[in-house]
Image (cartoon, coloured by chain):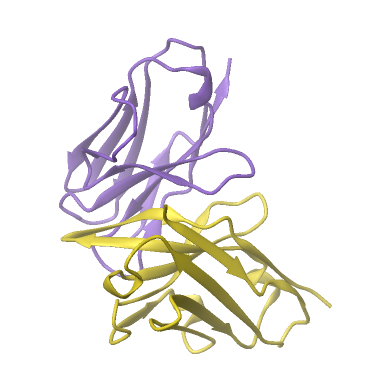
């Protein structure tokens, strides 16, 4: 199952609303997770099962979607949110990641 | 506190072998599936292999099937990745990852990674 993320990068300002999309090559129900990775650090789980917020993750992060189309929304960007974001499908092995979206400071 | 500490990375020639280890602590290791995920320098994430909590089921990414073997020792709270016939494209930071399997599967804790470089 291929997972396509868009955009591959974006520039945004603190306080902006940011939306990242992920499209699967076939229906994956809600088996879609989102991770955040900062430079030199391991990835961190943000959202699992398309819309469930991982414990400790701020509520400005929201996941939605089902089937083939999914969205990660950051409601109001903070300085610590500048990072690369990855989606990942867990419907069937091989488990696959999207190519990533780098969120940069405008 | 959950901790995953990888070791065993290094420089190896093409065609060579390497065995990665991951020491787990802070949780009941023998009740969790585990995975290896890698990241080539400057590139995205790639899932490599997964093993069930009791070792009875294993899954692999297509390009490593037949070359890599995932295993675990629950008595030692340890996860392993035996890598044979290594290629330049296997060069990456390899993360040990805890899987949460509750219907859906997701990676809820990650180690800091061990670097594997395949070069002559």
Give the colour in which the image draws chain B: yellow
Quadrant position of the N terminus of chain A in the picture: bottom left
* Quarter of the rendering containing residue B89: bottom right
Q: Please provide percent x and percent y for residue A61.
A: 32, 28
Q: Which residue appears at 23% of the width and 43% of the height? A: A50
Chain identifier of the purple chain = A
Give the mark count.
Answer: 0
Camera-side residue of A105 and B54: B54
Q: Nearer the viewer, residue B72 or A74?
A: B72
Viewer-proximal residue, B39 or B101? B101
Image location (x, y in percent) of residue B14: 74, 82
Identified at 27% across, 49% down, the residue is A32
Image vertical order of residue B59 relative to residue A35, above or below: below
Residue B2 drawn at (x, y percent): 42, 56
Q: Quadrant of the C terminus of chain A?
A: top right
Which residue occupies the extreme right position in the image?
B120
- Residue lying at 28% horizontally and 87% vertically, measured from the top left: B56
Q: Is residue A54 left or right of residue A8?
A: left
Q: Residue at x 78, y 82 (%)?
A: B13
Frontmost residue, A99 versus A26? A99
Asked if residue A66 is positioned above or below residue B6 in the image, the reply reads above
């Amino acid at each position: 199952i291929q997972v396509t993320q868009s955009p591959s990068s974006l520039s945004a300002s603190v306080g902006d609303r940011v939306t990242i999309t992920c499209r699967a090559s076939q229906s994956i129900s809600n088996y879609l997770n989102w991770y955040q990775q900062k430079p030199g650090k391991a990835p961190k789980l943000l959202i699992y099962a398309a819309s469930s917020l991982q414990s400790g993750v701020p509520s400005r992060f929201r996941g939605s979607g089902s089937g083939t189309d999914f969205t990660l929304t950051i409601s109001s960007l903070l300085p610590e949110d500048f990072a690369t974001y990855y989606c990942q499908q867990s419907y069937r092995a091989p488990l696959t990641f999207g190519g990533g979206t780098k969120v940069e400071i405008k | 506190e959950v901790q995953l500490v990888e070791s065993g990375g290094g420089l190896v020639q093409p065609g060579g072998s390497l065995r990665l280890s991951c020491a787990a602590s802070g949780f009941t290791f023998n009740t969790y599936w585990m995975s290896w995920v890698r990241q080539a320098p400057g590139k995205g994430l790639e899932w490599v292999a997964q093993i069930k909590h009791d070792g009875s089921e294993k899954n692999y990414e297509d390009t490593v099937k037949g070359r890599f073997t995932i295993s675990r020792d629950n008595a030692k709270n340890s996860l392993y990745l035996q890598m044979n016939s290594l290629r330049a494209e296997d060069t990456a930071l390899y993360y040990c990852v805890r899987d949460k399997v509750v219907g859906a599967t997701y990676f809820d804790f990650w180690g800091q990674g061990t670097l594997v470089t395949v070069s002559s």
